[in-house]
């Protein structure tokens, strides 16, 4: 069945050869027609892939554009103004010698850290007050250093100095204080800034982070109350310094005197308080004032001053001057919002202050106004400032004054607010500076 003749085999072999030739020829023709198209497709595919990769690379290298904005008012971010221009967010740093305030660059006359130290001026003081909590109770404090040019005021060469320390024990309802009047210092340097005389020592960092020591040594308490007391704390700013007057200068008298003036209106405070009953760790908040200039406190009869720190992040500073005819001569102040922006108050019409009662000192002939109702039309502030302890008089050899911690309640544009503060009252008692 499988036998083939030679002729049959030959014909079959030739047929197979012919078929293979035809198939091979067809494949060759197809291969000749297709490759160009395939090559184009493959080339195009490669080009597309390269383009896609190139675009991806280019996109990755592009800087993210500033987010679009829609015409909001300029604001401050640090010391830069952030504005909206042509739908784009623009950040403009304030120049040297200026600072950002409510979206504009305002002029500053104060330079840090240089101006944190002492100056060759007629009058100067550094002033720390605050409120401290501890296991031993709640305390208020004041530690102040004064420097006066005796020659410009009294014709005597050199400087005079004062150190005042006051501590209020809120739980006991007692106020303790001491003072020193000196012609020399223990340490007085500007690099680093160290100011020390008698019972006061300030190590000032220039950025508001300062080390404060104030002592009431045993037997040196002015009312012969229990002692010793010693406050040893470090304070650190929560906000930048507030430049009063808008640029850091305020008027100090009708005769043209002026003062450089800034405050750290909110500082954290941590350290120790040594009391006759033991030593306690303390923490809380503080306020720092620094003033200097060609003025003298005898240029006016007295002044009243308030610092206020609110729980919602606002602070207020207010002051008013009384002339030698017992008339209100000037008043001014600053509102500080939670971001550190400043609103200046200047003029009799900018706020009103009315005392609700008075206190007669058993130490001097002073009769001091206490407990105040304060109205500030800007932002509609209505405030009550309440005295915790009446007898917080800092009577001393040079100038008698009242310096005490207070509590604040009220409203801002109808919203309830509360906080703590300090108040200073001068010109109400006879002393060397007020012989009348």
Image (cartoon, helix red, strand yellow):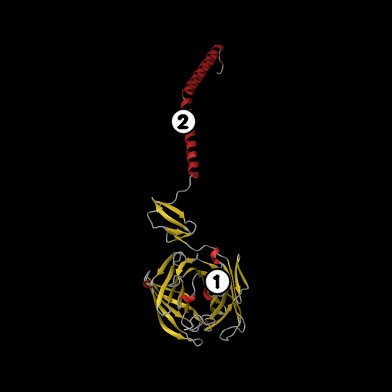
Residue plotted at (53% across, 78% down): 138
360 or 415: which is nearer to us?
360
Q: Is residue 218 left or right of residue 104?
A: right
- Name the residue carrying label 2: 41
- Return the residue nearer the eye: 141 or 59: 141
Disc 2 element:
helix
- Horizontal side of 200 relative to 97 (left or right) equals right
Residue 88 appears in the rendering? yes
Question: 371 or 274: nearer the eye?
Answer: 371
Q: CA distance from mark 2 to mark 1?
A: 76 Å
**Residue 431 % position (x, y):** 50, 83
Q: Position of residue 378 (x, y in %)?
A: 37, 69
The residue most toward the front is 155
User: Of 156 and 94, which appears nearest the observer?
Assistant: 156
Secondary structure beneath label 1: strand
Quarter location, residue 193: bottom right
Task: Provide residue 54's location: percent of width, then percent of height.
Answer: 49, 39
Q: Tell us which disc is closer to us: 2 or 1.
A: 1
Question: What residue sits right under mark 1 in the picture?
Answer: 269
Image spot of residue 270 (x, y percent): 57, 71
């Amino acid at each position: 069945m499988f036998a083939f003749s030679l002729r049959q085999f030959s014909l079959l072999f030739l047929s197979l050869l012919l078929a293979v030739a035809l198939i091979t020829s067809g494949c060759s023709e197809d291969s000749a027609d297709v490759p160009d198209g395939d090559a184009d497709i493959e080339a195009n595919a490669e080009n597309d892939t390269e383009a896609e990769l190139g675009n991806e690379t280019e996109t990755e290298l592009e800087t993210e554009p500033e987010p679009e904005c829609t015409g909001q008012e300029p604001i401050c971010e640090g010391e830069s103004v952030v504005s909206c221009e042509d739908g784009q967010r623009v950040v403009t740093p304030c120049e040297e010698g200026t600072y950002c305030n409510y979206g504009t660059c305002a002029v500053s006359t104060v330079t840090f850290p240089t101006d944190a130290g002492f100056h060759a001026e007629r009058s100067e003081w550094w002033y720390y007050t605050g409120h401290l909590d501890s296991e031993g109770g709640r305390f208020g404090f004041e530690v102040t250093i004064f420097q006066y040019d005796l020659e410009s005021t009294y014709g005597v060469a050199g400087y005079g100095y004062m150190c005042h320390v006051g501590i209020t024990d809120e739980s006991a309802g007692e106020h303790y204080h001491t003072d020193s009047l000196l012609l020399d210092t223990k340490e007085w340097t500007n690099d680093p800034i160290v100011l020390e005389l008698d019972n006061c020592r300030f190590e000032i960092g220039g950025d508001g982070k300062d080390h404060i020591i104030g002592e009431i040594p045993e037997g040196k308490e002015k009312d012969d109350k229990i002692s010793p007391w010693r406050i040893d704390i470090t304070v650190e700013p929560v906000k930048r310094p507030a430049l009063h007057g808008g640029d850091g200068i305020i008027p100090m008298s009708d005769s043209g005197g002026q003062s450089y003036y800034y405050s750290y209106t909110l500082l954290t405070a941590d350290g120790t308080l040594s009391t006759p009953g033991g030593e306690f760790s303390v923490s809380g908040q503080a306020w720092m004032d620094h003033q200097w200039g060609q003025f003298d406190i005898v240029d006016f009869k007295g002044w009243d001053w308030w610092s206020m720190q609110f729980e919602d992040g606002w602070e207020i500073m207010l002051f008013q001057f009384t002339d030698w005819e017992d008339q209100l001569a000037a008043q001014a102040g600053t509102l500080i919002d939670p971001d550190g922006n400043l609103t200046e108050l200047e003029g009799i019409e900018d706020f009103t202050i009315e005392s609700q009662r008075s206190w007669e000192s058993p130490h001097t002939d002073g009769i001091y106004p206490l407990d105040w109702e304060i109205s500030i039309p800007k932002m509609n502030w209505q405030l009550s400032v309440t005295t915790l302890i009446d007898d917080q008089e800092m009577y001393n050899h040079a100038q008698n004054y009242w310096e005490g911690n207070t509590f604040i309640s009220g409203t801002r544009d109808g919203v309830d607010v509360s906080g703590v503060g300090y108040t200073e009252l001068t010109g109400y008692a006879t002393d060397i500076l007020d012989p009348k």
